[in-house]
Amino acid sequence: MLRDYVTERDPEISAITLNLDPGVKVMPYTPDIDIRDYLVLEEVMTKYGLGPNGAMILASDLMVNFLDDLKYEIDEYNPDWVFVDTAGQLELFAFRETGPLIASSLGFGSIQRAVSFLFDSNLVLRPNGFISTLLLAASVQFRFRNIPQINVLSKADLLSEDQIEMVVNWSQDFKALEDSTNERESGLIRELSMLISEVFSQLGSTSELISCSIKEKDGLDYLFAYLQRIFDSDKSKFY
């Protein structure tokens, strides 16, 4: 868990976790603050007669009713950093109005914030999969345009060193991405991928892609340093 790594790396930093996924069943850690104390998916399903998908959409909107409670709990801890875990489905947080509203409401005053977007290592080994993920990352960056974004290649322990180098290189060199697209894709997918990669090439690179593995603790030093460059050491933080 990144929170534990940060506090071990720098004992002067106090950090807590905030879970904003009301439907999660099993978590690899125990959150310090949990939206499920106020809003539970099964209760939303029962109360409003909805299925799991509809209830998750409604629950993501209902979370704004508990912002004051969440801010009160955060203030009680008075942490330096807050790691916020959201639902994995982008449409439930990033692409609804409530996502940016929650981020701006919790990150009030002088608090510094950052958004972390995960490039799933299982989805980015082909150029079209990488470009699709890059489009999603750019969309999230646009939605939270006033907040710095960190792009993270997650589950890097599932990839070889050569695969990691290839994907990270695609994020830095769009000519290499175009060449790989030309070599490995065909038909309409190739044409669309080439057009999209050309657009990114003209716009310039998005956020740097950081390769990380929580399991192996690889790349965490670099991610930690990246976060420190974003956050001021003498202020409260929101991540």
Image (cartoon, rainbow, N blue to C red):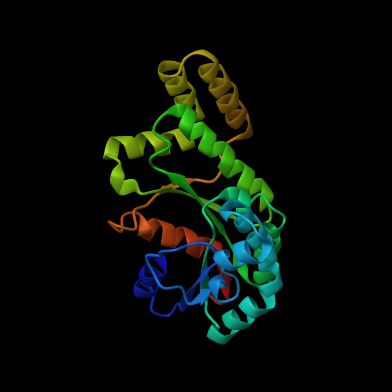
Q: Is residue 118 left or right of residue 237?
A: left
Relative to 211, residue 11 above or below: below
Q: Nearer the viewer, residue 63 or 51?
A: 51
Relative to 237, residue 185 above or below: above
Q: Nearer the viewer, residue 107 or 228?
A: 107
Quarter assignment of residue 48: bottom right
Q: Residue furthest bottom?
A: 76
Q: Position of residue 9 (x, y in %)?
A: 35, 71
Name the residue: 72% across, 55% down.
97
Name the residue: 69% across, 78% down.
68
Of the 4 image quadrants, the one containing the N terminus is bottom left
Quarter assignment of residue 65: bottom right
Q: Position of residue 39 (x, y in %)?
A: 60, 71
Q: Is residue 121 left or right of residue 206?
A: left
Of the 4 image quadrants, the one containing the C terminus is bottom right
Q: Nearer the viewer, residue 26 or 181?
A: 26
Name the residue: 58% across, 24% down.
198
Q: Nearer the viewer, residue 69 or 190?
A: 69
Relative to 130, residue 141 above or below: below
Q: Position of residue 189 (x, y in %)?
A: 52, 20
Specify whether residue 239 is in view: no
Relative to 229, residue 35 above or below: below
Q: Position of residue 20 (x, y in %)?
A: 56, 65
Specify whether residue 143 is in view: yes
Q: Is residue 122 left or right of residue 55?
A: left
Name the residue: 69% across, 52% down.
96
Q: Residue furthest top?
A: 187
Q: How many marks?
A: 0
